[in-house]
Amino acid sequence: MKREILFEQRVGEDRVIRIVQGDLTEEQVDAIVNAANEHLQHGGGVAGAIVRKGGQVIQEESDRWVREHGSVRTGTAAITGAGALPCRYVIHTVGPVWHGGGQGEEALLASAVRSALDMAVRHQLSSVSLPAISSGIFGFPKARCAEIILQEVYDHLSSRPDSTLREINLCNIDSETSQILLEEARRRWGGEKKQNADEK
């Protein structure tokens, strides 16, 4: 499908957040973020698409990670190579399954996003693309998911001068999720497509 940038928000002089509708597996960035389960078994959803496109080597590296480090706790992340994908790495972050909101799901989702971004910085990466973690089969309400992810991404870029990240794309293939993210970005930063965050 054709990639479309729906919204672009500059943070400071040289950092940018984008809302993108497109295929995550085709993003030409240093790393894409996979919404994974704790055992890194990439069967369905975004995870399944990543292995189909990138090759079985991603699943094999994931299995090795779990053997060496144990399962990936909810709210934390792991990293593997990207196989045949155009990026260099896949960062596998485990978001929470939604149980109604009373079991710390919001804090766990925020932690999952932070863990993915921190993993990118540890590997000296400058660009990542991530989906709306937990909002698919894990059932996290999409609007609240958009709020939390945008907040964490903005906080990272605006308050971490040591961060290597310069470009963070929120990339989803379906129009519903993309539009919800777009609406949340406009609510935060106004209706203009391009505007400097520091001017708000």
Image: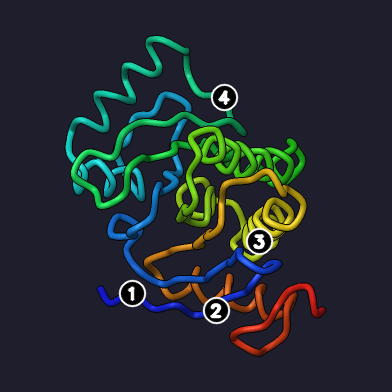
Name the residue that disc number 3 marks: 150
The mark that comes first in sequence, 4 or 2, is 2
Question: Which residue has dot 1 on it?
Answer: 3
Q: Given contact means CB atoms under 8 Å apart, are the residues at marks 3 and 2 in contact?
A: no
Instruction: Give how far apart the Cα atoms at labels 4 and 3 are.
Output: 22 Å
Amino acid carrying label 4: it is Arg
Residue 68 lies, in percent from the top left, at 41, 10
Compared to residue 47, the image places residue 38 above or below, namely: above
Query: What numbered label is drawn on residue 7?
Result: 2
Image x and y of residue 67, in percent: 37, 11
Mark pair 1, 2: CA separation: 12 Å
Classify mark 4: residues with Cα within 10 Å, few (<14), some (14-19) or many (20+).
some
What is the secondary structure assignment of the residue under circle 3? helix
Element at label 2: strand
Question: Where's residue 22, x and y in %?
Answer: 35, 69
* Of residues 88 and 38, the one drawn nearer to the viewer in this rendering: 88
Instruction: State which tag comes first along the sequence, 4 or 1.
Output: 1
Could you say which disc has been placed on residue 97 in the image?
none
Residue placed under numbered mark 4 in the picture: 73
Sequence-first disc among 3 and 2: 2
Residue shown at 31% from the left, 34% from the top? 81
What residue sits 51% from the left and 45% below the top?
138
Point 69% across, 62% down: residue: 147
Q: Label 3 is placed on what type of residue? A: Leu
Q: List the single residue furthest toward the bottom.
A: 192
**Dots 4 and 3: beta carbons under 8 Å?**
no
Which three-letter amino acid code belongs to the residue tagged 2?
Answer: Phe
Using the numbered discs, state the Cα–Cα distance from disc 4 to disc 1 in whole angstroms. Answer: 32 Å
Measure how far apart labels 4 and 2 are at the Cα level.
32 Å
Q: Is residue 97 above or below residue 173?
A: above
Where's the C terminus, which quadrant? Answer: bottom right
Q: Quick check: 6 above or below 77?
A: below
